[in-house]
Amino acid sequence: MPCNTIRNLDIATLRSFVTVAELGGVTRAAERLNLTQSAVSMQLKRLEMALDQQLVERAGRGVCLTREGEQLLGYGRRILTLNDEAWQRMTHHAFEGRVRFGVPEDLVLPFVSPVMRDFAADFPRVRISLTSSITRKLIEQFDEGRLDVILTTEPVDTGTGECLYRGPLQWSVGRGSLIWKQRPLPLAAKVDCIFLPVMLAAPERAGIQCESPYEANHWRDLEAFVRAGLAIESNMSFVLDRDRDRVPVPEDSGLPPLPDFGIFLYIREGAPDLALQFAGIVRDTNFAPETRKPRAIQ
């Protein structure tokens, strides 16, 4: 029957054992570890006593591993690798610093939280500065060098960053609302929203009169008008996919289709390595509405 008692291997004794095994002798291992020969021999003996197994035996002027020692060697190397990696990640200056990240407001809840969680798991000593704003302002701050990494939502024919997702805008309305039948068509507009020119131009080309009776300075305020059934708006499909209170306008509504927009990734030239690591996690995010999954923890 397996033993339920938890025992812990001592990292220092395990390191001495692995070093002796790899160098073939206590003397050379002691030199490598900057220890005395007697100290290394004592650590080997202590490890053998803890496991109740003979791990090494003399072979001429050196030592060789027993069958049990060969079995432990593989485990020992893996344990030491993880130990050294964890120590380096937690203490090395290369894993300290700050990443300045900018993202449109409507992407924060669906996607940014998982990205920051995964990055913090890999780099727990790094600070993340998050700026949520409209795309135009994010690009301005990025160009001024105030942000290291940004995501934007832009028309696919004008975005110049790395396109992570492409899809059409969708008209949306509060669940149960028929406000999309009203004329003039009431639009919920956010000040400086990059979608607003498209929302105005498409109905105009289709001969549908529009008005913007509800204006908001913040994305959350705009959502309130739409959820209340007072106006319609447009957004990317993956954002609507996560909202139970807003639904796409029916396809047979007569409203004109909207063009494709993309999510673009920008990384500041000369950004620190930590920002590149962060951008890699952002890049791994799948924005497709039905197939998006959280990044696996490495």
Image (cartoon, helix red, strand yellow):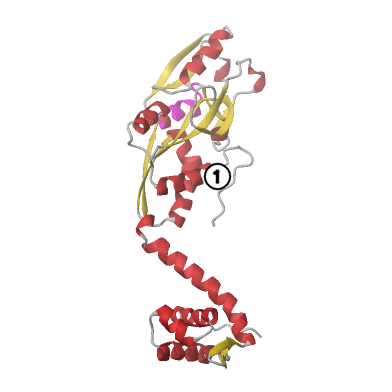
Task: Spot the residue most to the front.
Answer: 61
Q: Residue at x 65, y 22 (%)?
A: 251
**Picture coordinates of residue 278 (x, y %)?**
45, 47
Q: Could you tell me which quadrant the N terminus lies in? A: bottom right
Decide if residue 156 is on the left or right side of residue 89. Answer: right
Part of the protein shown in magenta: 220-231
Name above or below for residue 109 compared with residue 62. above
**Picture coordinates of residue 253 (x, y %)?**
63, 18
Magenta: main secondary structure equals helix
Q: Which of the 4 image quadrants contains residue 71?
A: bottom right
Q: Which of the 4 image quadrants contains residue 163?
A: top right
The magenta stretch spans residue 227: yes
Q: Could you tell me which quadrant the C terminus lies in? A: bottom right
Q: Amino acid at mark 1?
A: Asp
Q: Residue at x 43, y 34 (%)?
A: 105
Q: Is residue 265 visible?
A: yes
Decide if residue 296 is on the left or right side of residue 192. Answer: right
Residue occupied by mark 1: 284
**Picture coordinates of residue 224 (x, y %)?**
44, 29
Mark 1: secondary structure: loop
**Picture coordinates of residue 136 (x, y %)?**
40, 26
